[in-house]
Amino acid sequence: MTKFLFLSFFILLLGFSAFFVSSCDPDNSCTEITWYEDAEGDGLGNPSVSLDSCEQPEGYVTDNSDTDDTNGSNTLHEAFSEFDSENFIIYLDGNEVVIESNGWPNHTSPYWSNTTERVAIDPMGNTLITPAASENHPLFVEPTATTYEDMAPGNIDDFNGSYTLRVPTNPSTATNSSATGLGPIGIAISGAMIYNDEEGPNVPLDNAVVSLDYTAAHTGPQSYHYHLEPKAWSDDDNKLIGIMSDGFFIYGRRDYDGNYPTDLDESGGHFGPTLHNPDGEYHYHIQNETFLGQYYIIFPGDFQGTPNDIQ
């Protein structure tokens, strides 16, 4: 019995000694450093949220220079500051941005109400008449790129509906791309809608170019909308065009630095800095390929994110 107790005490002593040596061995010790939360995942940490650890915790970095590390969930993207305040109401609802537009542009067009009666023939051969207004709208201008005879029926201010788009505050690319459909596929910063490269079911845009005004837009069954580069504010530059229904912004043909991007995917998108986010994000561009030798279609590709309805 005594021999057994002595053996047990000896084993316990060895274990304690090993623990003591291991704990005091400088080769097995660590030096804790301070890590800062990186909610945005951009490599820049929040100086107000930190912890000390020997190893890097997930979601933390050593940098502490990000004083606005909000991950986009509770603040509007800077790009929304360019959306016309008279035509939009834009606000946050949880993890979504709600974009409400009256559908009207903030610039001139021959499609505003005016004192000229217009007669048009629709694809089914029906005669459509836009009656003359009692006076010209303040933003009305005479047609230049089109003519009264070629203009589509309807005036901008005949449309009294509104459009709402809800998108995630942090949109992400999807596993598979999605084809665009007829009707609004995006909303321009002017307040008007963005359409794709089709005029109707199996009707190419080629047949409707003559009806587009100087900023490549015309009226349609639902709204005044752009098909091509909107020259009322963007012409071969890097300006913000609007937001697509998958939540990604779309810019002009040039990149943030004034050069043409060379790494665009099949939808005209890429990850990189923008005028509103120097750290970089996925965004689209008007593709720098001519249509009918002189025009630039705003969005001829597929959505790389998950599209949301514009209602």
Image: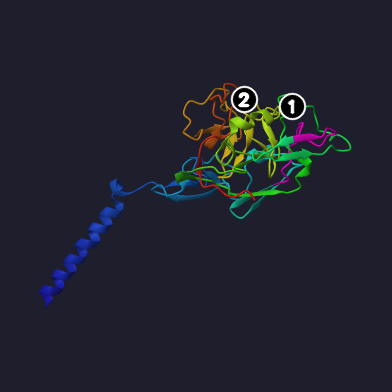
Q: Residue at x 84, y 37 (%)?
A: 132
The relative height of residue 205 versus residue 145 in the rendered view (above or below) is: below
Amino acid at dot 1: Thr
Whether residue 212 is visible: no
How is this picture coloured?
Answer: rainbow
Single out the residue that lies furthest toward the right.
134
The mark nearer the N terminus, 2 or 1, is: 1
Give the extent of the magenta segment: 101-119
Q: Which mark is residue 147?
A: 1
- How many neighbours does mark 2 have within 10 angstroms: few (below 14), some (14-19), or many (20 or more)? some
Q: Does the magenta stretch include residue 107?
A: yes
Q: Which residue is drawn at 62% across and 44% down?
A: 183
Q: Position of residue 41 (x, y in %)?
A: 49, 44
Q: Is residue 125 magenta?
A: no
Q: Where is residue 77 in the image (x, y as percent from the top left)?
A: 62, 42
- In the figure, residue 249 lies in which quadrant? top right
Q: Residue 237 carries which label?
A: 2
